[in-house]
Amino acid sequence: MQFEVEGMTCSHCAQTVTAAVKGAAPAAQVQIDLETGRVSVTGGDDRRDAVAAAIKEAGYAVKA
C-alpha cells in the first residue's frame, strides 16, 4: 500500500514514520522516499486504516 505523507524532511522523520507503521503492522516492510513524501508498505494490507492512523498520530499528515 502507498501513502503520501506531508511533513517528512529528514532521516529522523523517516525513522518516526517507520516506527509508527511497525507499531500498527509489525510484519510490514516500510520504504520511505523523503523527496516525494511517499511511504510504501508491503504486508499488513488489512491494516491500512490502522497504519494511516498511526502515521497521523506520529504527527504527519496522510494524503492518500
Image: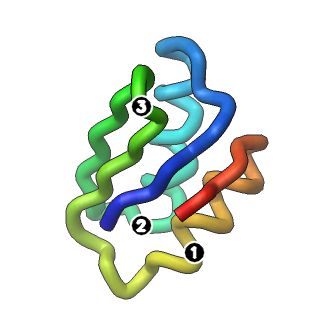
Asked whether disc 1 touches disc 2, contact meaning CB atoms under 8 Å apart, the reply is yes
The residue shown at (37%, 86%) is 46
Q: Which residue is mark 3?
A: 36
Q: Secondary structure at mark 1?
A: helix
For label 2, the residue is 25
> Quick check: 51 above or below 48?
above
The amino acid on which the numbered mark 1 sits, given as a three-letter code, is: Ala
Amino acid type at image mark 2: Ala
CA neighbours of label 1 inside 10 A, class few (<14), some (14 to 19), many (20+):
some
Task: Identify the image quadrant of the N terminus.
Answer: bottom left
Relative vertical location of residue 25 with respect to residue 56 in this rendering, above or below? below
Q: CA distance from mark 2 to mark 3?
A: 23 Å
Nearer the camera: disc 1 or disc 2: 1
Q: Label 3 is placed on what type of residue?
A: Thr
* Residue 41 numbered mark, or none: none
> How many C-alpha atoms fall within 10 Å of the one at disc 2: few (<14), some, or many (≥20)?
many
Which comes sooner in the sequence, label 2 or label 3? Answer: 2
Task: Return the x and y of residue 54 as percentages of the image width and height.
Answer: 64, 60
Q: Residue at x 31, y 51 (%)?
A: 40
- The total number of labels drawn is 3
* Residue located at (44% from left, 53% from top): 22
Quick check: 13 above or below 29?
above
For label 1, the residue is 50
Q: Are there few (<14), some (14-19), or many (20+) residues within 10 Å of tag 3?
A: few
Alpha carbon distance from label 1 to label 2: 8 Å
Q: Which one is in front in this view, the residue at disc 1 or the one at disc 3?
A: 3
